[in-house]
Amino acid sequence: MMRALSIASTGLGSQQLSIEVIANNLANVSTVGFKKSRGEFQDLMYQTLKSAGTATATGTLPVGIQLGSGVIPVSVHRTFAQGDFQQTQNPLDLAIEGDGFFQVTLPDGSTGYSRAGSLSLDSEGSIVTAEGYPLLPNITIPSGAQTVTILPTGVVSAVVTTGAAPQLVGTLELARFTNPAGLHSIGKNLYQATDASGEAVTGAPGEEGFGTVQQGSLEGSNVNIAEEMVNMIVAQRAYELNSKAIQTTDEMLSMVNNLKR
Amino acid sequence: MDGIYPVLSGALAQEKRLEVITNNLANVNTAGFKKDHPLFEGIGLPPGLNAGPSGSITPSPTFEILHHVFTDFSSGPIRMTGEPLDIAIEGEGFFAVQTPGGVRYTRGGSFTLDAQGQITTHDGFPLLGTGGPITLPPGSIQIDAEGRLSVKGTEVGAQPTEVDALALYRFSDPSRLKKVGNTLFESVGGGAVPFPEGRVSQGALEGANVNPVEEMVAMITVMRLYESAQKAIQTADEVASKAANEVGRL
């Protein structure tokens, strides 16, 4: 069978993956703390029919014959560029300006990392994510607190009785990674550390490369709709080109079939 | 029956040409991909062998065969991505990456960090700087036009410090580069010359240099030539059929 068919099908598969990544970015355009991804592709191995540099009777072959076998997706690369800030005035909405992730304790006891700072209090007064997972280190706001203040450095204080001085209730800690693109997404705006991301380095907001925390704001997704739409057009046209190649191959095969009458 | 095999060689050549076009189209969005052009040659039998008994020379049938596939190293379109480790080479030059099989060269400028802070390709092959693989301390990465890498550390008030410079290479004869997949090239018989004059731009990616219009036109040509070959084979068959079935009928 003609190899062109399988080559073109690798092209279709790759462009389809591109569209899937773009569709997921667009689906999460309003997801707090979402980070967009990009499909990366590489050419597949080559079949060498004649090697360049092979000795012949009269010298060496200056160029050879290599036939490619298509394209393969090599990674879906997540981009941790800063998203837009939205002002919400909610005292438990936090945005990280700069590097770092909030740490949360997952139900299985492991640590998850997130940029989504839409937090709330549970029945015990612990600061939890929208999913109900407690922040790490756990911070508990005393019951009956009037106001909660979170400084850019992550210091959390609360005024318990009207007129009294605010009392310190805890300090937020952020985590960062050598290679955040290597984090494993588990959905729900959460990531887990992997061998590729490296160990989490933890520290206080505003120190040693960590971003600062902004109370009353949320970090939106870093998806740029115009960019995604353009990428979608490019991927669609590339898909179309590959489908035309399949069509051409099919017509050629049909000619072969009609050769014997 | 002589005529049918040269025509068949032409049809087979078109199939090979279609494979090359399809591979170019499959990689139309592959960063750093360089398109291929197949070149064909006609080979004929030496006239002497073909001489008739009376010494008359009949036209020698010509067979079309794939002579070589030549890679076009012209630059692809550069688009801005804003990613700190997307690096496009402006003009000539190649990045060098360390693979288990030795140093390979690439124009695909989409890199990432591994857990140790080393710059690698997406398959984990380290990118080479002037001092070997490049390991970056944490901080924000800046790459200037000359390929010098600086990192602004994470301490408060840190200044950017130069870490290394990208090792770019050029080839006096890029046609000696062999494609090995993963948008990498192997230098056959050496010839890689350090190219410190190379210019790069950070936050940009070089796309494939495939021109869809060119490839579509080539594809139409392939299909039509294939169609002609099919017609020619059928005609040759009809002629042979007449010879077999009609000549000699009383």
Image (tube, coloured by chain):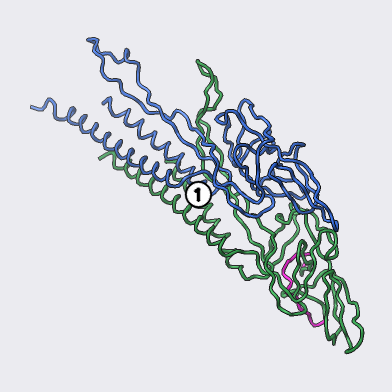
Chain colours: A green, B blue
- Over which residues does the magenta segment extend? A107-124
Q: Amino acid at mark 1?
A: Gly
Quarter of the figure that contains the C terminus of chain B: top left
B64 shown above or below B168: above
A73 shown above or below A142: above
Q: Quadrant of residue A45?
A: top right
Q: Residue at x 39, y 49 (%)?
A: A247
Instruction: Name the spot of residue B96 as percent of width and height, x first.
Output: 67, 37
Q: Main secondary structure of the magenta part?
A: loop
Q: Nearer the viewer, residue A99 or A19?
A: A99
Callout 1: few (<14), some (14-19), or many (20+) C-alpha neighbours within 10 Å? many
Q: Read off the residue under disc 1.
A: A11
Q: Nearer the viewer, residue A12 or B95?
A: B95
Instruction: Name the spot of residue A175 as percent of width and height, x first.
Output: 80, 62
Do we see residue A177 in this rendering? yes
Of all residues, the one furthest to the top in this rendering is: B54
Q: How many discs appear?
A: 1
Quarter of the figure that contains the N terminus of chain B: top left
Q: Quadrant of residue B229?
A: top left
Instruction: Name the spot of residue B21 as percent of width and height, x first.
Output: 45, 41
- Left or right? Give the position of B157 relative to B240: right
- Left or right? Give the position of B187 relative to B135: left
Query: Is residue A121 shown in magenta?
Result: yes
A78 shown above or below B125: below
Of all residues, the one furthest to the bottom in this rendering is: A162
Q: Residue at x 80, y 66 (%)?
A: A212
